[in-house]
């Protein structure tokens, strides 16, 4: 890797714009440089990891004091100096003088069980509202140049603005980058579609490190795991964000897609006796409604369908409906 290429990667890392492939390249470079000097540079693996984290902390401090051209040069010097033992000498000296390095951040996991919602406050003050069956993982404090979290399920984010520390949300196949804005991500493992919906500000969505899409308010990108295709479209925000206010909305929706929503929302299992009834569609808006109330509405507009509770957590829909 040339010095020019290294500077470009470091600059992108500070802005939170590295793709997964570029992150792997930079990580591999750092590992090789550290490995080359590990016998004389590091006290142990934990010491090596601390040094790696603090290097970027130092780079970020310099970024706040100098122009971009200056701090990128400093960043390159820090990284390259790993290969000649300069950085390890500095940290070894600090340790010898009794300086205490901050411990590595513990990863915290918060989950909203099926049938429940959960609001989480992140270390930077950003708020995350988790939908049913969703989980978010984040460090107990953000020390790197970016604020990175991992999401499984659906969540609405209200991110504290910080131009020096981009906010990054990673899901199974997409990465979303922001500075300060509000947006919604839906990425359940058992669903074929991943959607990112922007409420305010601007965000960048990176799909499998190949397609970068910029969104403005009221726009959404939908990625299909099976076809690997994506669509960017303007949408009605209320339709996709009403879940935050306890509202379930169905717009001419088939039971095939409505049932998984009901199962997550109420933490139940819903069986359909006649599989052809999955194509039955209905429309309705339900605010803080019970499952039985919703089922009553469905069977009212579709008289050929009935339902029964097999147990408190299991329901069966009976009948035939092809429209």
Image (cartoon, grey):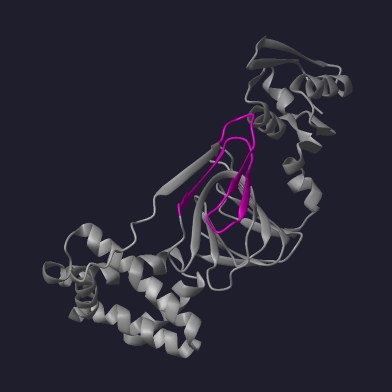
Above/below status of 117 relative to 317: below
Considering depth in this image, is 247 or 96 the residue closer to the camera? Answer: 96
Residue 65 highlighted magenta (yes or no): no
Above/below status of 120 relative to 203: above
Q: Identify the residue at the far left of this view.
A: 39
Residue 294 appears in which quarter of the rendering? top right
Is residue 321 visible to the viewer in this orientation of the structure? no
The magenta span reads 112-140
Considering depth in this image, is 210 or 46 the residue closer to the camera? Answer: 46
Q: Identify the residue at the far front of this view.
A: 98
Q: Where's residue 259, x and y in %? A: 69, 29
Residue 2 appears in which quarter of the rendering? bottom left
Q: Where's residue 202, x and y in %? A: 68, 67
Above/below status of 300 relative to 201: above
Q: Quadrant of the C terminus?
A: top right
Is residue 12 visible to the viewer in this orientation of the structure? yes
Q: Where's residue 75, x and y in %? A: 37, 81
Q: Quadrant of the N terminus?
A: bottom left
Determine whether, in the image, residue 110 is placed left or right of residue 293: left
Determine whether, in the image, residue 211 is placed left or right of residue 143: right
Q: Where's residue 272, x and y in %? A: 68, 19
Residue 136 highlighted magenta (yes or no): yes
The residue depicted at 21 percent of the width and 71 percent of the height is 97
The residue depicted at 68 percent of the width and 58 percent of the height is 182
Considering depth in this image, is 296 or 78 the residue closer to the camera? Answer: 78
């Amino acid at each position: 890797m040339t010095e020019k290429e290294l500077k470009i990667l470091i600059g992108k890392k500070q802005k939170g714009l590295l793709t997964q492939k570029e992150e792997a390249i930079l990580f591999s470079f750092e590992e090789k440089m550290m490995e080359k000097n590990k016998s004389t540079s590091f006290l142990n693996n934990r010491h090596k990891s601390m040094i790696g984290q603090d290097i970027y902390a130092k780079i970020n401090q310099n970024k706040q004091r100098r122009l971009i051209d200056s701090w990128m040069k400093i960043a390159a010097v820090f990284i390259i100096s790993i290969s000649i033992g300069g950085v390890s000498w500095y940290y070894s000296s600090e340790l010898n003088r009794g300086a205490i390095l901050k411990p590595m951040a513990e990863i915290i996991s918060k989950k909203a069980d099926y049938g429940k919602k959960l609001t989480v406050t992140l270390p930077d003050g950003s708020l995350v509202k988790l939908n049913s069956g969703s989980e978010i993982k984040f460090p107990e404090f953000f020390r790197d140049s970016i604020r990175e979290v991992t999401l499984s399920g659906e969540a609405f984010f209200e991110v504290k603005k910080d131009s020096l520390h981009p906010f990054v949300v990673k899901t199974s196949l997409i990465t979303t980058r922001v500075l300060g804005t509000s947006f919604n991500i839906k990425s359940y493992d058992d669903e074929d579609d991943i959607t990112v919906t922007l409420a305010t500000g601007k965000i960048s969505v990176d799909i499998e490190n190949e397609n970068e899409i910029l969104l403005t308010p009221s726009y959404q990108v939908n990625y299909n795991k099976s076809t690997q295709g994506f669509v960017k479209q303007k949408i009605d925000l209320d339709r996709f964000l009403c879940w935050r206010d306890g509202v379930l909305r169905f717009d001419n929706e088939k039971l095939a897609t409505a049932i998984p929503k009901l199962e997550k929302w109420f933490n139940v299992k819903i069986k359909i006796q006649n599989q052809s009834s999955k194509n039955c569609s209905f429309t309705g808006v339900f605010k803080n409604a019970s499952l039985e109330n919703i089922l009553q509405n469905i069977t009212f507009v579709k008289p050929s369908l009935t339902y029964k509770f097999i147990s408190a957590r299991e329901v069966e829909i009976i009948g035939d409906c092809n429209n």
